[in-house]
Image (tube, helix red, strand yellow):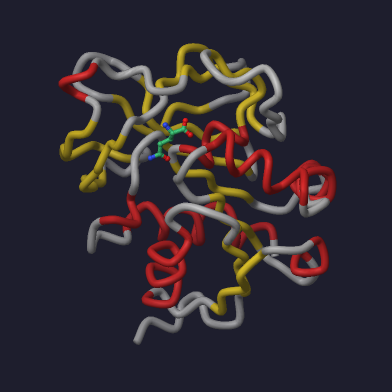
């Protein structure tokens, strides 16, 4: 059992999508996990993960549950956040090819396009270089968004071989267009905990 992260509590937004897989990945790393379904669940967190799923559905559920604004405010106030796929879309400042009534948290200065990989590449798996230490991670892409613009303060953590940006970080907020929770490789979750959650605590 890895004890490096014990004592830290990380929320997983658990309204829809791949929250169970993120919960398992965090538990493997020794973190206490809180299923975030209501505003009160945001209290006492050291970080939060927004899973993949369907961003427009998650946006609607966030709105219905009164979580949209408290979550946005908590992240703006410094809560470390990590979004994967639909979670990255939710964090983005600008979302292209979405529904007019879909909300975003405006936590990351990027523009993303939903479902941007061509039809035959809707889903694929690859190995990526991730972060500045040259670490390799397994990445599963499922109807993934593409990052089309990154703001001046945004650091690119990973790209595909053709240069397409697939993971970014800006201060205490990061996101990737793939699903690290669907592999047994916990490297990306480890990065989130070590580089964003621990320093902010
Ligand atoms: N295509 C989905 C969306 O727009 C995201 C896919 C995913 O999270 N695997 O929300």
As displayed, is residue 44 above or below residue 200? below
Up-down relation of residue 31 to residue 130 (above or below): below
**Quadrant placement of the C terminus:** bottom right
Give 16 or 131, whichever is nearer the viewer.
16
Give the side of residue 149 with respect to residue 8, left or right: left
The residue sitting at the bottom extreme is 1
Question: Which residue is more in the foreground, 133 or 157?
Answer: 157
Front in this rendered view, residue 101 or 92: 101
**Looking at the image, in which quadrant does ligand 1 appear?**
top left
Tell me how many marks there are.
0
Q: In front: 25, or 169?
A: 25
The spot of residue 120 in percent (x, y) is: 16, 21
47, above or below 23, in the image: above
Q: Residue at x 62, y 73 (%)?
A: 34
Residue 99, percent across and down?
Answer: 61, 20
Name which residue lies at 68% across and 48% down: 61
Q: Quadrant of residue 184?
A: bottom left
Left or right for 31, reference 107: left
- Relative side of 82 to 21, left or right: right
Where residue 167 sits in the image (x, y, percent)? 41, 33
Q: Quadrant of residue 199?
A: bottom right
Please report the residue visible at 61 percent of the width from the left and 16 percent of the height from the top: 152
Residue 47: x and y in percent read: 64, 60
Is 36 drawn above or below residue 112 in the view shown? below
For image coordinates 21% across by 45% down, the residue present is: 136
Task: Tell me if 89 is positioned left or right of 163 in this view.
Answer: right
Q: Quadrant of the N terminus?
A: bottom left
């Amino acid at each position: 059992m890895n004890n490096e992260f014990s004592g830290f509590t990380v929320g997983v937004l658990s309204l829809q999508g791949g929250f169970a897989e993120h919960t398992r990945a965090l538990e493997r790393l020794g973190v206490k996990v809180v299923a975030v379904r209501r505003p009160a669940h945001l209290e006492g967190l050291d970080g939060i993960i927004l899973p993949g799923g369907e961003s427009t559905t998650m946006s609607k559920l966030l709105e219905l549950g009164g979580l949209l604004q408290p979550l946005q405010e908590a992240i703006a106030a410094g809560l470390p956040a990590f979004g994967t796929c639909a979670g990255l879309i939710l964090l983005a400042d600008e979302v292209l090819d979405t529904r007019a009534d879909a909300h975003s948290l405006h936590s990351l200065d990027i523009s993303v396009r939903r479902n941007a990989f061509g039809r035959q590449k809707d889903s694929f798996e690859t190995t990526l270089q991730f972060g500045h230490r040259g670490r390799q991670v397994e990445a599963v892409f499922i109807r993934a968004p593409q990052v089309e613009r990154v703001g001046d303060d945004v650091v690119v953590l990973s790209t595909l071989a053709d240069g397409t940006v697939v993971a970014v970080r800006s201060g205490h907020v990061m996101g990737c267009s793939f699903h690290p929770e669907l592999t047994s490789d916990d490297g990306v979750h480890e990065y989130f905990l070590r580089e964003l959650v621990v320093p902010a605590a």
